[in-house]
Image: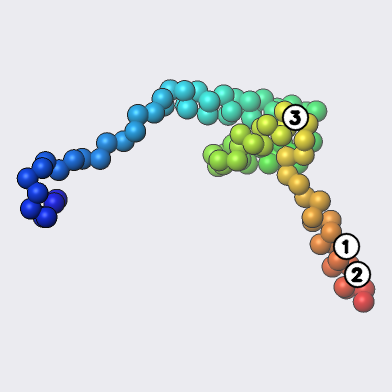
Amino acid sequence: MSTHGSSAPERQATPQATNSTKNQTLSEGIKRRAQSLINDRTIDANERTWLRYALEINDPALPELVRRADAGEPIIDDSHLLEVSTEEKINAAG
């Protein structure tokens, strides 16, 4: 409610028009592709687990994970875990 004394009618905010059908189709397409990748036994089991989890929680990163899997790229870069593990072993031995 406006109390500044203007005689102009108050404007109500209206949401921007979006093409929800297109957005929904994309989302459903990503979900179908993710499910297909989860069922693909040629993909590493750990990577399929990540895809399954992202699909279950509706992770906004799912499209990127699907893109990586389609491109044959690692879905999750866990190379830094090896570095930490090696450092821990060195520190423990020292």
Residue at which label 2 appears = 90
| Residue 93 in picture, x, y percent from top left | 92, 73
Residue at which label 1 appears = 86
Residue at which label 3 appears = 71
Q: Residue at x 79, y 56 (%)?
A: 81
Label 1 – label 3 distance at C-alpha = 30 Å
Could you tell me if the residues under marks 2 and 1 are in contact, i.e. CB atoms within 8 Å?
yes
Could you tell me if the residues under marks 1 and 3 are in contact, i.e. CB atoms within 8 Å?
no
Mark in the foreground, 1 or 3: 3
Mark 3 belongs to which amino acid?
Ala
- Callout 2: SS: helix
**Sooner in the amino-acid sequence: mark 2 or mark 3:** 3
Q: Residue 24, can we see it?
A: yes
**What colour scheme was applied to this rendering of the protein?**
rainbow
Mark 1 belongs to which amino acid?
Thr
- When the figure is inspected, residue 15 is found, relative to residue 86, above or below; the finding is above
Mark 2 belongs to which amino acid?
Ile
